[in-house]
């Protein structure tokens, strides 16, 4: 479904992504692990079109999307959920969710999607008319994921969904993501702490210093001494 | 000062406030959405006024109530074209925040002088929305003044509804609050930028149609309104709607009374002094901002 | 080495050309007048560029300093009898003081705010000058909208400069021009100037000179106001007139075009821009009202397509020359 080929990206002089390639099949749950500042977030931003790669190409459903605008990519059903959330601070929770449904194919499904979001995150329903600036970190995280779901994604690229959350909330968030996958979406997420995500992921990539250093199933990762030490913390 | 004069001055101040409010809302919306401070908005004001004059009493002689909607639509489209042709290409420049200040300034000087070329230096006048007066108790007020107030409030309410109920209105707010977030949910940024300028063009035309019967039209007419609207948005806090409304009326009433007691030329210097002091000590305005 | 030599030679050549210009045009008052104007506006534009292009301050009220200098020296000369020579200094000092006072609060403002506040001066100052006209201050009247007239011209060793003989005026203006451009050059090459350049070209993360930045900016702001004020005083004594019309938006527009067309922050670009635009402005006179529309359009096009002004044109010409030379060379080297 998504095929990333030899992506290179620079911030100024610094090369952040080095020949990164990866593949995600339809219906998969793929996790990318890596330490902070090693290019994980940049990779997702390049995939969703916020940043343009210097070289390499990205294929999504047999379309080259590496030169498209984020708007066009969202309209094709590839939706990015950023780590720093980028919510609209002076708008209410309901208005933020509604903005998620702005693109054409999502507007017609707005009602169902509202119900889905409220079912996954019942808390959001009670906060409907609050502005975002008054939400807690966990609530804002749920809203960011909820807003992404409002776009009727076929493919979700999620940046550190559990970052900064209390442990019980982390589990909730991952359960919700798994539920989304079972409803037919494909998931690609990046995480720093592998602890929970590795329970859900079908396949795992590890990224270090802008390079993919490992690719395989969870079992293979468990058997790889180095990876286990580095990321799984076992 | 007797009560009659006082009421008259107050009314003049309040009606002037609606004009400042229109201009201030245009500036704020454009700044919030596109991060451009549009020096050319004073020219939008002038062009709106001259267009209404040209279509009605000036040359073509059309019915004024037909001319008004046409003027508004034309100025909306003109605003959008302005953004597409002038502002959008500048976005790829590295130091574009500086470039865009100079370019909108240059545009406004070119547009004002184009008025001079086309319409000449003599001042023009456009009709009142309604001639005649209204008697309220023992006070006599011009119907145009009443309409200024009504239309000003109406436009304000319509704009607020537009920004909180419609898809495009909400999207405009979303872009001004988080540009990256707006990209992520797939908002059409380039369209929204143009729409913001279009609305500013429309609001400027409304302001001109309301104010010009009182002040006449001349090529540089837009500047004083623009500069005062600027003081309004800074005083009210950039992006703070409640603050902007209060500031618009407070300043306009202050201006009218100041002019009455001290003479008209002191309004602008005093506003500037207030503005500078305020900017130094309370950079976010009296009412905070987004 | 060779490059430096060439540069110095071309500078000397330029000075020689400026020195012998009157031989060509001494009997044409119209052209002499335009050249003198070029020199005066060259000083004004270069001093504005000091703020706009080097200190990176969006100050759009520079002509107020020019006008304040003109009025200060004119009033002092007319009502107190100060000689014009001292008037040039007094005009500069008056402008510097006002510039300093305006700068204290304004230079703390963010770019956009500074721009609008200083730009507003173009509207405020003229109304105040007109207000302080006949009947207001008996001994110090500004002359209202007509302006201050009959401002005396300077005299030197018994010779009194007059508008009937422009060649002496020309040499005086040239001296004035060279003196102030040297001062501006020294400011740019001073530690403060170099610090400004470093600041302007620095990466975003290094955008601060620390505590002294504000002081430096204030100092340069006042210095540049001094130069503009002195130029205003000189202008007033040359035309024996200074009026609020010198602050009309069209004058503002013309000087803005000079600085932008000459190139922001590329000394002596602004002065070169002043020469070109003063002449272009004269050539455009037959287009009547279109002149200002054209100048406004030049502002827009310059910013859009040649942000470095004349330097971009020179670079373009250079590339074109190279390509032509290359074509020649390659056509020679390929056998027919």
Image: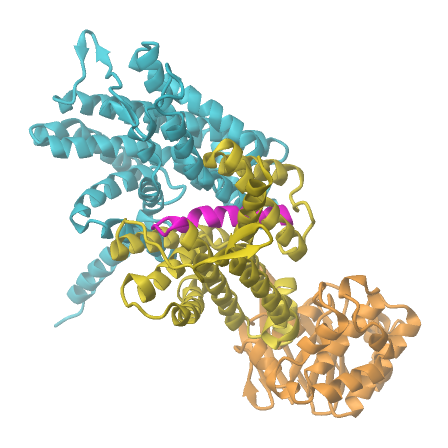
Q: Residue furthest left?
A: C27
Foreground residue, B135 or B166?
B135
State which quarter of the image contains the N terminus of chain C.
top left
Foreground residue, A52 or C41?
C41
Q: Residue at x 80, y 91 (%)?
A: A182
Foreground residue, A184 or C228?
C228
Left or right: C33 in relation to A80 = left
| Above-or-below relation of C332 to C217 | below
Q: Position of residue C206 (x, y in %)?
A: 60, 45
Of all chains in the rendering, the one displayed in orange is A
Left or right: C49 in relation to A51 = left
Q: Position of residue C329 (x, y in %)?
A: 19, 61
Left or right: B214 in relation to C205 = left
| Above-or-below relation of C265 to C322 | above
Left or right: C128 in relation to C33 = right
Q: Residue furthest front?
A: B138
Q: Residue at x 37, y 55 (%)?
A: B107
Q: Does the magenta segment cover residue B13? A: no
State which quarter of the image contains the C terminus of chain C.
bottom left
Q: Position of residue A77 (x, y in %)?
A: 64, 85
Of all chains in the rendering, the one displayed in yellow is B
| Segment colored magenta | B215-236
Chief SS of the magenta region:
helix
When asked about the image quadrant of residue A25, the answer is: bottom right
Q: Position of residue A137 (x, y in %)?
A: 83, 65
What colour do you see for chain C?
A: cyan
Q: Does the magenta segment cover residue B226? A: yes
């Amino acid at each position: 479904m998504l095929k990333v080929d030899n992506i290179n990206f620079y911030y100024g002089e610094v090369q952040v992504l080095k020949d990164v390639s990866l593949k995600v099949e339809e219906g998969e749950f793929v996790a990318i692990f890596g330490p902070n500042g090693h290019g994980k977030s940049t990779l997702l931003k390049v995939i969703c079109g916020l940043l343009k790669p210097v070289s390499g190409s990205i294929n999504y459903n047999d379309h080259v999307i590496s030169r498209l605008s984020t708007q066009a990519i969202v309209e094709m059903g590839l939706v990015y959920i950023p780590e720093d959330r980028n919510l609209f601070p002076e708008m209410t929770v309901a208005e933020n969710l509604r903005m998620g449904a702005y693109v054409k194919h999502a507007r017609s499904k707005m009602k169902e999607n509202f119900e889905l979001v409220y079912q996954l995150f019942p808390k959001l329903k009670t906060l409907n008319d609050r502005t975002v600036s008054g939400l807690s970190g966990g609530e804002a995280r749920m809203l960011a994921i909820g807003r992404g779901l409002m776009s009727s994604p076929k493919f979700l690229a999620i940046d550190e969904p559990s970052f900064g959350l209390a442990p019980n909330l982390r589990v909730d968030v991952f359960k919700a993501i798994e539920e989304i996958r079972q409803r037919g979406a494909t998931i690609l997420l990046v995480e720093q702490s592998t602890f929970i995500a590795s329970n859900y992921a079908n396949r795992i990539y590890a990224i270090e210093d802008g390079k993919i250093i490992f690719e395989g199933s969870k079992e293979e990762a468990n058997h790889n001494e180095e990876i286990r030490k580095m990321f799984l913390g076992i | 000062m007797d009560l009659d004069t006082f009421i008259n001055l107050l009314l003049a101040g309040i009606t002037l406030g609606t004009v400042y409010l229109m201009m201030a809302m245009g500036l704020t919306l454009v700044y919030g959405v596109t991060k451009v401070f549009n020096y050319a908005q004073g020219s939008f004001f002038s062009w709106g006024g001259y267009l209404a004059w040209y279509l009605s009493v000036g040359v073509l002689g059309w019915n004024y109530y037909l001319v008004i909607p046409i003027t508004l639509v034309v100025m909306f489209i003109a605003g959008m074209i302005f953004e597409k042709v002038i502002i959008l290409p500048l976005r790829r420049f590295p130091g574009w925040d500086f470039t865009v200040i100079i370019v909108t300034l240059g545009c406004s000087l070119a547009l004002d002088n184009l008025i001079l070329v086309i319409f000449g230096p003599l001042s023009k006048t456009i009709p009142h929305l309604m001639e005649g007066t209204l008697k309220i108790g023992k006070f006599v007020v011009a119907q145009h003044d009443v309409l200024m107030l009504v239309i000003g409030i109406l436009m304000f309410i319509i704009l607020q509804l537009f920004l909180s109920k419609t898809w495009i209105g909400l999207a405009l707010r979303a872009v001004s609050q988080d540009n990256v977030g707006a990209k992520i949910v797939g908002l059409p940024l380039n369209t929204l930028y143009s729409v913001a300028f279009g609305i500013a063009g429309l609001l400027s035309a409304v302001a001109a149609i309301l104010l010009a019967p009182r002040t006449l039209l001349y090529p540089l007419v837009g500047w004083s309104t623009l500069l005062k609207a600027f003081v309004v948005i800074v005083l009210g806090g950039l992006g703070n709607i409640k603050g902007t409304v209060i500031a618009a009326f407070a300043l306009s009433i202050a201006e009218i009374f100041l002019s009455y007691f001290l003479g008209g030329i002191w309004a602008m210097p005093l506003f500037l002094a207030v503005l500078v002091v305020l900017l130094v000590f309370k950079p976010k305005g009296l009412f905070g901002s987004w | 080495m060779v490059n430096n030599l060439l540069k110095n030679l071309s500078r000397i050549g330029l000075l020689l050309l400026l020195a012998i210009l009157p031989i060509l045009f001494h009997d044409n008052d119209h052209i002499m007048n335009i050249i003198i104007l070029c020199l005066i506006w060259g000083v004004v534009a270069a001093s504005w560029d000091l703020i706009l292009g080097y200190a990176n301050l969006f100050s759009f009220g520079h002509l107020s300093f020019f006008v304040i200098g003109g009025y200060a020296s004119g009033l002092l000369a007319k009502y107190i009898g100060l000689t014009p020579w001292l008037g040039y200094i007094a005009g500069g000092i008056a402008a510097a003081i006002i510039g300093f006072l305006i700068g204290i609060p304004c230079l703390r403002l963010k770019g956009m705010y500074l721009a609008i506040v200083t730009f507003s001066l173009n509207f405020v100052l003229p109304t105040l000058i007109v207000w302080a006209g006949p009947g207001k201050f008996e001994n110090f009247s500004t002359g209202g909208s007509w302006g201050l007239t009959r401002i005396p011209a300077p005299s030197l060793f018994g010779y009194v400069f007059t508008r009937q003989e422009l060649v002496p005026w020309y040499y005086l203006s040239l001296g004035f021009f060279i003196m102030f451009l040297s001062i501006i050059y020294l400011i740019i090459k001073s530690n403060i100037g170099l610090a400004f350049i470093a600041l302007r070209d620095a990466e975003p993360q290094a955008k601060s000179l620390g505590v002294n930045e504000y002081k430096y900016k204030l100092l340069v702001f006042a210095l540049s106001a001094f130069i503009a004020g002195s130029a205003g005083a000189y202008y007033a004594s040359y035309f024996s007139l200074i009026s609020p019309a010198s602050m009309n938006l069209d004058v503002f527009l013309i000087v803005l075009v000079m600085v932008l067309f000459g190139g922001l922050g590329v000394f002596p670009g602004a002065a070169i821009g002043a020469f070109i635009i003063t002449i272009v402005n004269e050539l455009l006179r037959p287009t009547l009202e279109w002149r200002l529309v054209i100048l406004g359009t030049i502002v827009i096009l310059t910013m859009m397509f040649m942000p470095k002004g004349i330097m971009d044109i020179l670079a373009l010409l250079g590339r074109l020359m190279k390509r032509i030379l290359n074509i020649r060379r390659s056509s020679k080297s390929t056998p027919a």
